Each structure stands twice: as C-alpha cells, then as structure tokens.
Amino acid sequence: MYKLRATILKDIQILLRDRVGLIFMFAMPILLVLVITAIQSSTFELVNKNKLSLLVCNKDTGSLGGELVKAIDKIGMFRLMAVQKDQSDKMITDRMHAKDAMLAIIIPESFSSKTTARAKNTADKALHSFGLEGDSLQASPGSVDPLTLYYHPILQEPYRLSVKGALSSALQLVESKQVLRILYFSINEKEMPDSTEKEMLNNQVTITEIPLSMDGLKRMPNASQHNVPAWTIFAMFFIVISLSGSIVREKLSGSFIRLKTLPTRYGLVIASKQITYLCVTLIQAAIIFGIGVWVFPFIGLPALDLPADISGLIIISLLCGCCAVSYAICIGVFARTQEQANGFGAASIVILAAIGGLMVPAFAMPGSFSTIIKLSPLHWCLEAYYGLFLEGGKLKDILMNIIPLLAITVLLQLIIIWGLKRKRLI
C-alpha cells in the first residue's frame, strides 16, 4: 500500500508539471463546451431571437405582393429589409456581398395578377365539381412567375432548406387566401369578412411535441443537455496527450530498467497511473458539469439539468473515465516516441469522436457507418450519458450501453497486459 501511495504522489507531481497536458485536459474542453453550446443554443433560438436578414424587393403591381411580405414577416424567422423597386438585381447582390444580408427575395411584377388568375381558375373548377354555377372554365392561366431567392454561399444547406420551406409556406398561405376569397364571392356575391377569413385560415390542427423519455416526464432538451455530456467525454479521452506521453518518457528515460532493480513490479506503476488519471477524469466531469449548472445561466446559456439518478451519473462517469485511461495507456505502451503518442493519440480521439456521434449525430451518418459507429468507445459513452440526461433514464435503463463500454475497456486492458509482457516489462 505504501508503494502504491508513493507512486501515485509521484504521478501527481509529474502531472502538475505537465502544463501543456493540463491545458488539453481542462482549459480546451471547457472552452469547447462554452463556444459550441453558445453556437448551438443560438441555432436552436434562431426563430425567436437571431433572425436572418432578408432583403425584400417587391416589384408587384398588385396587393398580393404586400400580403406575401406580411406573411413572411409573421413567420418570425427573418429580419426584413425593404429594397426599392427600381434597384437592379446587381445592386441587391452587391449589398449581399457586403454582408448587409444573407438572403434576398425578389417578387415579380405579375405576381398578383397571375396568382389571382390561377386562384380563380382553381375556384371555378371547385364550383363546377360541386355542381354550382361559376364562370366558364378557361384554359389554364399558366404558372406564376417564380420568385427569385438569392442566398449567400456561406449559408449551409440545412439553413437554406429551412428558409425555402418557410417561404413556400408563406406563398401557399397567400394563394389559399385568394382562392377562399374568390369562392366566397362567387357563392355569396360579396367580399369575405376579415373575421371569417381569419377563422377559416387559422382553424388548423395544432401539433403537440412530446420528447421521448424513460420516466414519462415531458422535458424539453436544450443545447446544454446535448453538448455538455458530449464534450465531457471528449475531455476525458484527451488525457491521452498527457498519460501516453508520460509512459513514453519513462520508457525512453530508462525508468523501466531501473524499476527492475527495485523490489517492485511495473504493474504497480501502471495501476498508479490508472488511479491518478481516473481521478483526473472525474474532476474533469465535475468541473464541466458544474459550469453547465452554475455558470451557463450567468452568460445567457440554458442551464444544464442534472439527471435524477445522480448515482447512475457517477457510475457512468467512472466507467467512461476507466475506458479513457485504458485507451491512453494502450497508446503509451505501444508508442515508441512521444511524438507518435501525441500525434496518433490526438488524431485518433478526434476520429473516434467524429464517428462516435460527438460532432455529427449518429442518425445523420450514412448507413454504411452503422457498424463503424459501434466500434468507437466514445459512442457508447455518449449513448449512456444521453440515456440519463435526455431520456431521463436510470442506470438499469442504459445497461445495453454499459455492457459494450465495459467490453471495450476490458479488451483494452488485455491489450495493455499483452503489450507489457511482450516488451518484458511485467
């Protein structure tokens, strides 16, 4: 016991002198959590707060163009910026190049006339199908001239598709209103009252959103619930920089050979490193979770809600830490130089994080990645945390995620023992 305590104290002193390693283990993950959570929180609140700037050039000579502009404004997703009718397309695109706006829409001159003609044709068909009198059916009025939507290339495809869907909804609303007006006038021979129009258009089925949960509670996940667990795992596994480098330095400095002359075994040294760095991973988790709970609200970010099963959270953090330590030691045992350990360790963690779902959600990956994803220990760590944070589960509910994580950890430990025996260190 005395030897183990002395070895742990030695590892702590070495760790405290490794300033670069401490930065990678604590400062970098905290910065990542703050920055990425802020960005994703801003993305989630795009509709309510951070609206996209939209240049609107209404060249329409009728009233429907103005209605379309009002419908777009009611969406709440855009900050509208009016553009004079006489401005050319080039003048509008020049303003976009100057980053005045990310989007621009041009409503053509014939929008009202052609939309009305098409709505009238649709209403006449409906009246004839009901056996009611209407104007004689005419040839199709043709399609309405398309609206022109300019978007800046830096606007990513998901945002562009969301914008297109929102504009299509506004356009559909304007067309539906016009059809209803024509039908009402044809039947009642008077204009449709505003109250009737609002009642007919707003009388739609609402959608109740219910997030899936294991405990039956309706909790709405936020950016903190997604990001804090993910980047806590990333921080845990990034101890590979310090831990693997420490093992390689001891091999190169001859410490292994000197240990053979002492009444101890190198297995004790490995056990010491595992205990020391396991404590480091738990401290990392405590700090990052603490920031999410107490610091996030002060900087305008949604607070992290800890799961009800705190004991399950501690056990999962302990298992994730064991897996991270095992992986780091495995890299250190087989690396021949510190450059190999640092380079391969850092690159492999980034790759495992990417395929494990920390950077891109697993459900968004190609089907061919379904098997590769399961090989990443970070994936099982993330699934276990998500089961607690997002689904409100308890430890017994996430056993199917814990078992693969334990299997990977045991496999890494066996590889460590095999590598140490192969190098005649134990």
Image (cartoon, grey):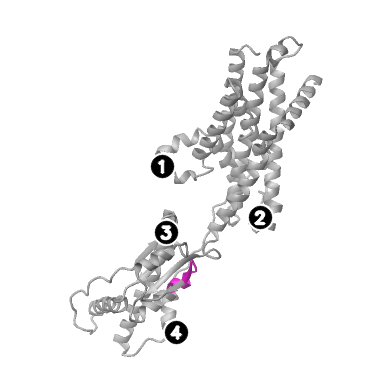
Q: Marks 2 and 1, Cα distance to the nearest angstrom?
A: 32 Å
| Disc 4: which residue | 195
Residue 152: mark? 3
Amino acid residing under circle 2: Ala
Name the residue type under label 1. Answer: Pro
Foreground residue, 317 or 422? Answer: 422
At 46% from the left and 34% from the top, the residue drawn is 372
Q: Position of residue 6 (x, y in %)?
A: 79, 22
Q: CA distance from mark 1 to mark 3?
A: 27 Å
Q: Which residue is mark 1?
A: 366
Judging from the image, what secondary structure is the residue with disc 4 in? helix
Q: Label 1 crowding class (10 Å Cα cut-off): few <14, some 14-19, many 20+?
A: few
Could you tell which of marks 2 and 4 lies nearer the N-terminus?
4
Q: Residue 404 location in percent, x, y?
A: 55, 32
Q: Earlier in the sequence, mark 2 or mark 3?
A: 3
Residue 314 figure quarter: top right
Amino acid type shown at disc 3? His
Q: Earlier in the sequence, mark 1 or mark 4?
A: 4
Q: Which mark is residue 303?
A: 2
The answer to which image quadrant residue 319 occupies is top right
Question: Given contact means CB atoms under 8 Å apart, are the residues at marks 1 and 3 in contact?
Answer: no
User: Which one is in front in this view, the residue at disc 1 or the one at disc 3?
Assistant: 3
Looking at the image, do the residues carrying marks 2 and 3 touch, with CB atoms under 8 Å apart?
no
Q: Nearer the viewer, residue 258 or 213?
A: 258
Q: Residues under labels 4 and 3: Cα distance?
A: 40 Å
Q: Is residue 391 visible?
A: no
The quadrant of the picture occupied by the N terminus is top right
| Number of residue marks | 4
Question: Which tag, 1 or 3, sits closer to the chain's start?
Answer: 3
The part of the chain drawn in magenta is 71-80
Q: CA distance from mark 1 to mark 4?
A: 49 Å
The answer to which image quadrant residue 336 occupies is top right
